[in-house]
Amino acid sequence: MASVYFTPGPAQLYPTVAGHLQNALDQQVFSQSHRSQAFKDLYRRADEGLRALFGLPQDYAIYFTGSATEIWERSLQSLTSERTYHLVNGSFSKKYLDHAKWLGRDAQVLQVPFGQGFAIDQVQVPAGTELLAITQNETSSGVCVPVADIHLLRERNPEPLISVDIVSGAPYAPLDFSQIDMAFLSVQKGFGLPAGLGVWFVNERCRTKAAQLEGKQYTGGHHSIASLQDQYQGFQTPSTPNVLDIYLLAHVVEDMLAKGLDVIRQETEAKAQQLYGFLEESALFSPFVQEKAHRSPTVIVADVLERPAAEIISILKKQGNIVGSGYGAFKDKQIRIANFPAISGQEVEGLIQLLKRL
Ligand SMILES: *Cc1c(COP(=O)(O)O)cnc(C)c1O
């Protein structure tokens, strides 16, 4: 019997993926040229779906890259020459910061302990900051930045470009894209697709800044905002893209639109409530994130009390439920449970029943 993957990426595939994949194979989609009209139509279809799902303002462009990791680097190369500012509260936000340092940027940081979120009144973005980097959902610790806080940061900081990592919060997080300048995701988390595709939303302000820097410094090799934008105008990509993932994304986005993002959000919240409710009452587990407003609805991290986390993970695995281990130093003490749209309410209920019997 197939297992249920509660892992925070790669994750459980969205239920419609298998059917779409078979259709693509039947239509020989993966042998078609990425310069063909068929590919341009596919890119346009994905573009239209993503715009509708995320409510993107007109001026946004949508680019495809190899991964979200690539977008950390490309965004810094294409949009900054000197100073960046990072909100760091876990491993993924820290990696965005690391990339800025590797590129020699004057990378400033507000860092809070693992498991904590940001008191938004304490965020003081220095003058001259070109890019403010926010990780909306810290997959390592299960802490989210409430979207209202991101909107408030825009209000208080009109100058810097605001870049938001929505890799493990999308499509759930109701972010207003008119209040930020760019966002990005990779598809193996909330979209429930095979890994290997980064999706980058870039507004006009970003493109203007990128154009100013173009030619003055290294703005990013085979992928840069300039090269991606150049190709995007004809719904193409600089290099041969991951057509498989673009095809699946275009179709899964349409499935999500048909279901309704409101419904997906309600379901996500209901499942999250069930999981956190269980963790609070359990003698064996407790929610790692103390501040309720900062508890991620999409990646739920639990402290395992008294028993080794590996033992719990192994018992659950034998019962066909794959949960994630804690991140880094928390490997032995925590489990992580992804609550992405691909996971049904029934599957969450099933997991809770197993956890109760431990
Ligand atoms: C997984 C993840 C990434 C990196 O995604 P890749 O596809 O491995 O590049 C970046 N940010 C967050 C928050 C993530 O969860």
Image (spheres, rainbow, N blue to C red):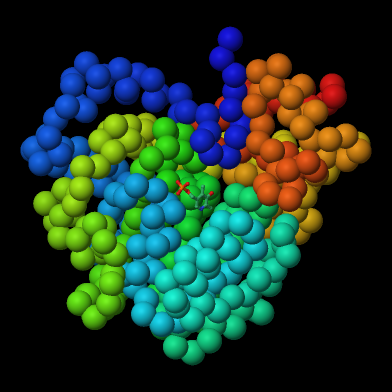
In the image, taking residue 70 as reference, residue 113 lies left or right, namely right
Q: Across the whole image, how many numbered discs are drawn on residues?
A: 0
Residue 177 appears in the picture as rendered: no
Residue 129 appears in the picture as rendered: yes
Q: Which quadrant would residue 299 be assigned to in this image?
A: top right
* Residue drawn 29% across the image and 65% down it: 220
* Residue drawn 15% across the image and 55% down it: 231
Residue 200 image offset from top left, x and y in percent: 34, 55
In the image, taking residue 291 as reference, residue 127 lies left or right, namely left
Which quarter of the rendered picture does the C terminus lie within? top right
Q: Is residue 247 above or below residue 122?
A: above
* Residue drawn 53% across the image and 43% down it: 265
Depth check, front residue: 190 or 74: 74
In the image, taking residue 295 as reference, residue 248 lies left or right, namely left
Q: Is residue 31 above or below residue 239?
A: above
Which quarter of the rendered picture does the N terminus lie within? top right
Residue 48 image offset from top left, x and y in percent: 25, 46
Q: Is residue 56 above or below residue 88?
A: above
Q: Is residue 114 above or below residue 308?
A: below
Q: Which quadrant would residue 317 be assigned to in this image?
A: top right
Residue 345 image offset from top left, x and y in percent: 62, 28
Residue 163 image offset from top left, x and y in percent: 43, 66
Check the image and name the residue furthest to the top.
1
